[in-house]
Structures are given as C-alpha cells and as structure tokens.
Amino acid sequence: MITFTLNGSDVSLDTDPQTPLLWALRDNLQLTGTKFGCGMGLCGACTVHLDGTAVRSCSLPLEAVAGKAVTTIEGLGGKHPLQQAWVAHNVPQCGYCQSGQIMSAAALLAANPAPDEEAVRQAMAGNLCRCGTYHKVQRAILSVAAVAHWEPSAEADS
Amino acid sequence: MKQTRRQFIRNVSIAGGALTLGFQLTGCSDKPLQVGSEADFRPNAFLRIDTDGVVTLQIPKAEMGQGIVTGMVTLVAEELEVDPATVRYEMAPVHSAFADPEMRLQITGGSASIRVYYDILRQVGASARETLIAAAMSQSGLPQDALQVSDGKVRSNDGRVLLSYAELVPTARTLPAAAAVALKPAAEFRLIGRYEQRVDALAKSDGTAQFGIDVAPEGCLTAVLLRCPWFDGAVETFDAAAALDMPGVAAVFATEHGVAVVAEGYWPARQAAAKVDVRFTPPAEGLRDSAAIASAMAAALDGDDFLSVRDDSGPDAEGGELVHARYEVPFLAHAPMEPLNATCRLTPGGCEVWVGTQAPDVAQDAASRVLGVPREAVVIHNQFLGGGFGRRAAADNVAEVVAIARELERPVKLVWSREDDVRHDWYRPAMAGQIQARVGAEGEVSHWRHRIVGPSINQQVIPVFAGTMLPQWVPAGARRLAGKAAARKDFASVEGAKELPYAFAGVSVQYQNLPLPVPLGYWRSVGHSHTAFVVESFVDELAHTAGICPLAFRRRYLAPDAPERRVLDAVAEAANWGRAAPGRFQGLAVHASFHSVVAEVVEVSLADGKPKLEHVYCAVDCGQVINPDIVRDQMIGGIVFALSAALYGEITLKDGAVEQGNYHDYPILRQNEVPPMTVVLLDSDAPPTGVGEPGTPPAAPALANALFAATGVRQRRLPLQLS
C-alpha cells in the first residue's frame, strides 16, 4: 500500500510499487489530464509536480512518491494564472501536450517568478509540442511572469 | 476545378422539440466513386437549437489542433448572430450527410475543411436566422422590416418586442426552413476575419479535453500489441506462459496483427508483453534497407522508364549552361504527441469504437470488416485528436482493437507505445528527383526537365479509401486495381512539381513509381513536402548560376498577376530581403498548395562556422481569413513541423525494420531551438483556402537556400546538416 497526497487529498494505492506514477494516475485514479507521450521522459507530456518540483511521471515509480505531495493539471483548478493565460493567448492547438507544458511552466514560475525569455526557452525545452505552439507557450508564461513582476506578492497581500 | 452543386436546405424536426436545420448536397455525379447511395437517409443535421436556446453544431471534421471547431462555429455564428463562445459542438457521427462534398469521405485532409464548408455553414446559420425571424413575425404580428437580430434575440425596431431564440424555437420548428438566403457581404462581418479566440482553449488548458486515449468505458481492459518489426511478417509461434503469470494479466493471444497482451491497465500489459516469447514469419525478399532503396532510386533515375505528368517541353533546347542536380528526401514519421489508440466495446451484432480519427467512416469500414458485420452495425465516437498530420486518416489501430475485442468479454483499449508509433507508421515516402535546365547568358531559362522517383502513396491508400466509398461486396482485387491506376501518375508524388509556376521555355515533369514494402501515408502537405524542396532549391541554384538575386529571378518568371508575386513581395518586405544585418544570411522559397500560396524567408547566422536559425518570415495568401490568430498559428506550426523534418527527420530501414523508435532518435524541434517567426496575412476578398498544410512546403527549401547563402555549400539531401 502506497500513500501520498494527490491534489491536496490523501490517496492510497495497493498496486505494483514499480508502476510509473503516470499509469497509476491514469489507470488507477482516472485522472487522465496527465498524458502519455513517450514513456522515456523525453517529451514532457506527463509532467506533474512532486513536492512542487516538475517531474516526468512516466519514469517515476509509484514507490518514489510515498508520503509526498503530487499535483496534477487537475490540481491547478482551471483558474490558475497560467491556465488563464493559456486561454487568453489561445495556446493549445491539438492540446495533448499542454497539461505537461502548463505543469512545467508552473514549476518554473514557482522557482523563478520573473524569468526572462531565454530562461523560459531553456526551462521549457523538455516539453515537446508537435503542433509547434512554442511561441504561444513562451508568450503566455511571460505574460504571467510580467504580472508577477509588476505586482509583488507583498503588495497583493496587503 | 469548380464543381456543380445543387444545394438545398430542409427543415427537419426531431424529437425533443428542437429546431434542426439540415443541409443537403447532391450532384457531383461525375465522380467515379461515391459514398453511400441515393437511398441513404440524409437529414444532414448540422445545427440544432433546443428549447433553452442552446445552439449545438455537429462538427463533420476532425479537430486535431488546426482549429476547425472554432472555424466552423464562427461561420455559423456569424450568420446566426450568436456569440461563438455560447455555441456547443459535438463530433459528428458517421453519416453520409457529413461526408466531405468533394472527397466523398467523412475525412479531414487536404486543408479543405474551411474552403469546402465556407458557404455551406454560413448558409446553415443564415437559414436558421431567417426561419427564427419568420417565427418572430408569426409570434409578434410584425413585418420583417420591423425586426432586427443580434446576440441570439429578435427585437422590434421600436424595442417593444424582444424574443429570444429559445422562445422562438417552438414556432420555428413548425416552419419551412428559409432557403437561398443571401449571405452577409464581407463589409458586415462581425466575426469572420475578426474573431481571435479558440472555443476549445479552456478544455485544453485544464486537463478536461477528452482524447481517444482518455476514454474508458465501464470495465475496460488495456491491450498492447507485439507487432512484427518488419512490415510483412505474421506471428509464427509464441509462448505466453511467463506473461500469463504476471499480475493483472487477463489474456494473451495472437491476432492477424500480432500478439495481444491484455491486462488491467497499460503498465501490467506492457510488463507482461516483455515476457512474451514471439517468433514472426520471415520477411519476403525485396528492398529492405535504406541504402538499397537509395541505390534503386538512383538506378531508376539513370533509366528511362518514366511517365509524363506534364509536357510542354518542345524540342530539346541548346546553348547556355546546362545545370543539373539530384535531390533525395527520406521516409518520415508523423509522430503525433498522442500515441495511436482505440477503444472497442462489442454490442449485439456489432461494436462501438472510441477513437480520435481523421476519417470516422474509414474507421467504421475497417471495424466492420474485422467483425464481418454491416458498416451500420459499427458506431464510431470521434474524440479530440492529439495531433493528426495525416497519420490518423489510417484506421490500422481500429482494425487492431476490434480484432482484440472480438476475443474478449469486456471492452478493451489498445494503446500503442511511442516505439510502436515510430516503427509502424504510414510513412511519408522517401523520394528522389533529378532536374536539369539551361541558363543562358542573360539568365534566360529553358529545358526544365524534372524526374521524380518514389513509391506511390495512392497505390496503398486508394484501395483502403475505396473500401469505404464503394459497397462492401466490391472485391479487394478491384480496389487494388484502382490503386494501381492511381499510382501510375500519382498526384501525391508529383503535386507541386507538376504545377511549376515559372514561365521557363520548355517544362517537362515525369514520374516513376517504385513500389516498396513500406506502409505509406499522407504527411502534412503530402507531395508538396518534397517537391517544394526540390523545385525551390533548384530555382535558387538557377538564380545563382544566372547571377541574379533569387527574389528578382523568381519575379522575372512569374506572371504579372501570379499570386506568388504578392506573397514574395510581402515576405521580402517583412524580412528586409537583401538587406540582412551583417552576419545574417537569408534564403527564400515560395510554394502554392491546397489553393493557398505561401512565401517564406529563413534567416541564419554563423557561429564558429555552424549555422544557427535566427528568424523565419512568412507571408500567406489564403483568401478570406476566418480567424487571424489561428491562421498565424497554422503557418508557424507548419513551419516548425517542416523544420523538424528538415533538420532531423529521417526514418531508416535495416532488414526491413525501422531503426528509430522514440523522440531521442527521431527528434522534433524543442522550445529552445525554435527561432522567432513573423507571419504576414495578405488581405483578400477571395473565398478562404487551405491553411493547415501550406505553411509546411516552403520552409525546407528556404532553409537550404539560407544555408547556401551562408556557407556556399548546396545541400540536396534532407535532413540538412548544420555542421
């Protein structure tokens, strides 16, 4: 039995501890927003957060998440500033890679709230998009980064 | 290639009290192949409005990222006077009413969807609007000129009467649908050319968009398939004892497609598959290695066994400098981000299939043949496609899952691995070409002789599509004959070369089919994906031979009213052509495809002798733009797709098997490799033309020409080398 926190709730799974987190999410927990693309950590479609860090769930055995916190695209809630920016900029084309793109972007902004263009390009290099939405991904992230930069959180809190 | 169409609208009431507008197309009887028959029931119900006023549109095309849902909703909403964001949409079921009026299949391809449905869907919206106005006249007693429509409501000019569509539905559904309604002139467009949102953006940003791979009917098992590495092998023997001992495994058995391993989820299925010991029948003799295929193509070019596809060559010219070159392009995989998959549940006498497909009727036909049931016994539920690019026009995944489901009592989802996808694609064929031309002292060009060798896509694909278009009793042999006939001068091999737009003195284009035991399919822009590279690279060679600027050279040989001129001038202006910054080098290409014309300039720099992509400029004339943001995205996406192939794309064969398997050895461009891009949309009042594919063809030659400008080395083989 492996227990971890998933999008804020505790879950326990009685399954092969070697099962990649991706398949536990999709097949055991019916959270299909996280996508299978390559199975080798090459494309980023399966990106989720493990204790706030972006990880490739296709290559992460379930036992590695025991006692930790996992956040998936469903856990962002749909109103995350990045998700709003994705809609405002019409980022998705086919949409298949976008959960992974958004999760990588969210982890980037958590670590670096105001990345410049080059930092975005490098941080997002692990997320493939066959439709070629890269410029829109970049622009959407920078739009959120700009807001974060413009309105320091201390100010927002007061 | 204008077709005669007779169009009429019928008002068809359906259960639930909704107003349903059908749209019927007949005619086109000059086409040799027809889907369905006169006896078919054709309600053609694209649109319905329910008693709550909710407008729902049936989408007859696949949404694979190109934005067709948004485009179609916009066309209807423009005339129906509603907000596109309020329109619901459903993927249309298989029905002859939803067959493409030109292709006669319910297929998404050829960048045709908006071009073909531009009038039809506006007419659907306009007819519905007029019928709702008629209902308002009936309910209010006011004449038509006392009423106006906006935002889903009919109002009286004096503001005293306000009727929502919901309130009008009960009356409207009893009225004959308004026919032959005049469409808005472009000057009155409120959405077309202006609306820049995507109606599916939210679902594709919050994880709720449902792709084929996300479907899981109650009790669904997961299957993986062990396929023969070479394309013509079958399962000879297999030992599943170890696999059957694995936890969660439900069954292991052979089908005509390989060994199916079925389990409670993908991971246990994949783990068990690794324990199956399988032997396949040995491959037949033939061309089974990339090197041997290249040699065979070269030998074919040395021979004389060609069919003419265009000949206005006149007598052989003499004089000037004879320039000649050979070009080669490799096999390419589509590699959409969503690996192929399909889900099947048996029903009494048939089955249901959930799949993201570009051709639900082809999928239906494939499933029905596996089960030996009538097509109507198969229900296809189309889903969002995680990329298509031509790959999902094939239904091999559907035939496979039905053959697996046939042996099971529970529904089953077949999921391909990425390796399955790269090694069992329907590939863009490898092709070879040879061109020669004479360049005179003043740069005058004569004696253009272009020969193309490669396997015909249509020889393989036409028999499959014919299987869907023709009655099912038509034997496979007859369908293969249709494929052979199409292969002789295969348009999918010569398109883009045959239509050479330059007025050179003497042009001949010839083709030789070289059948290969490799599955072939349509890859974004199809024949244009290689002919544009060859033609536009060679035109660049001629310009340099003549010592003339490649832009001026092209303009010189284009008719004054050629659409190529407009896009060339526009891209030249955007790119500041001829005045690149120091250390920057530019290459140019222009190509017409799918009724649109696109010119591109690729700009590179040299760092330590190694070229680097700096910027791509693009100008497109695609007629009336519906959604400017989506057109720009399609151009950029088409360019990224082309540059991935131009820089990295190569599928090679060894002993009949594909050597690549995943994104490490079949790479595509990443975020940090893509240069900035600028797209110019040309104003046009012509009807809309294709945008999904036309951005792709010019990118490879523009890059090759930029590399020549930078390095002085002419590269005639794809993928290009940057070192």
Image (cartoon, rainbow, N blue to C red):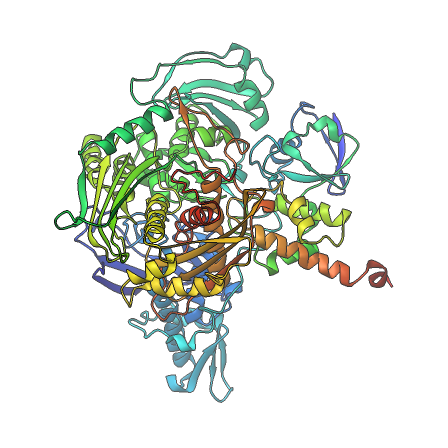
Q: Is residue B557 left or right of residue B145?
A: left
Residue at left offset 75%, top offset 54%: A114
The answer to whether residue B39 is left or right of residue B534 is left
Q: How far from the left and from the top, in percent, is residue A27?
A: 60, 33
Up the image or down, A25 lies above or below B674; here it is above
Front residue of this view, candidates B583 and B675:
B583
Q: Quadrant of residue B1?
A: bottom left
Q: Position of residue B701 (x, y in %)?
A: 40, 48
Look at the image and tell me whether residue B590 can be seen.
Answer: yes
Q: Nearer the viewer, residue B721 or B216?
A: B721
Asked if residue B505 lies left or right of residue B567, the reply is left
Side (left or right) of B496 relative to B488: right
Residue reaching furthest to the left: B315
Q: Is residue B319 above or below residue B137?
A: above
Where is residue B379 shown, x and y percent of the image?
A: 39, 41
The residue most toward the front is B441
Q: Nearer the viewer, residue B373 or B624?
A: B624
Where is residue B555 shown, x and y percent of the image? Answer: 33, 62
Above or below for B121 versus B521: below
